[in-house]
Amino acid sequence: MMEDKSFTVELKCLFCDCPLKGDTEKEYVSGDMLKCQECGELNDYDALIDVAAEEGKGVVADHEQSEIDKIAKNLFK
Ligand SMILES: [Zn+2]
């Protein structure tokens, strides 16, 4: 099985933590507000991106760690 190295980071409502379903036709830019379809709160796009970037870093860090583990196992087998 091929390893899928791609990953996506979901934008989640800052208020109720449910995934935001943005309008895919629309390009969101800094300063936009995304309305949550669950709780109706307006999420600041910049804040969402900050959170997503932090989560993305976590994903990347986990992935790199697993690569390091693999390399280490190969070295010491
Ligand atoms: Zn919400």
Image (cartoon, rainbow, N blue to C red):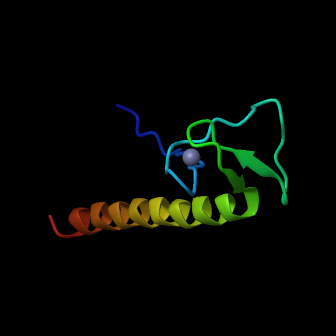
Query: What residue sits 45% from the left and 67% below the top?
Result: 61
Q: Work out whether residue 10 can be spotted.
A: no
Q: Where residue 37 sits in the image (x, y, percent)?
A: 62, 36
Q: Nearer the viewer, residue 7 or 33?
A: 33
Q: Where residue 29 sits in the image (x, y, percent)?
A: 85, 53
Query: What residue sits 50% from the left and 50% below the top?
Result: 16
Q: Where residue 25 sits in the image (x, y, percent)?
A: 82, 29
Q: Nearer the viewer, residue 57 or 36?
A: 36
Q: Is residue 73 above or below residue 16?
A: below
Query: What residue sits 26% from the left and 69% below the top?
Result: 72
**37 relative position to 63: left or right:** right
Give residue 35's quadrant in the image.
top right
Q: Is residue 72 above or below residue 32?
A: below
Q: Work out whether residue 21 can be spotted.
A: yes
Query: What residue sits 59% from the left and 63% below the top?
Result: 51
Q: Quadrant of the C terminus?
A: bottom left
Q: Is residue 17 above or below residue 63?
A: above
Count of all numbered marks drawn on residues in the image = 0
Single out the residue that lies furthest toward the left.
77
Q: Nearer the viewer, residue 50 or 15?
A: 15
Single out the residue that lies furthest toward the front.
40
**68 relative position to 47: left or right:** left
Q: Quadrant of the N terminus?
A: top left
Q: Where residue 76 sits in the image (x, y, percent)?
A: 17, 70
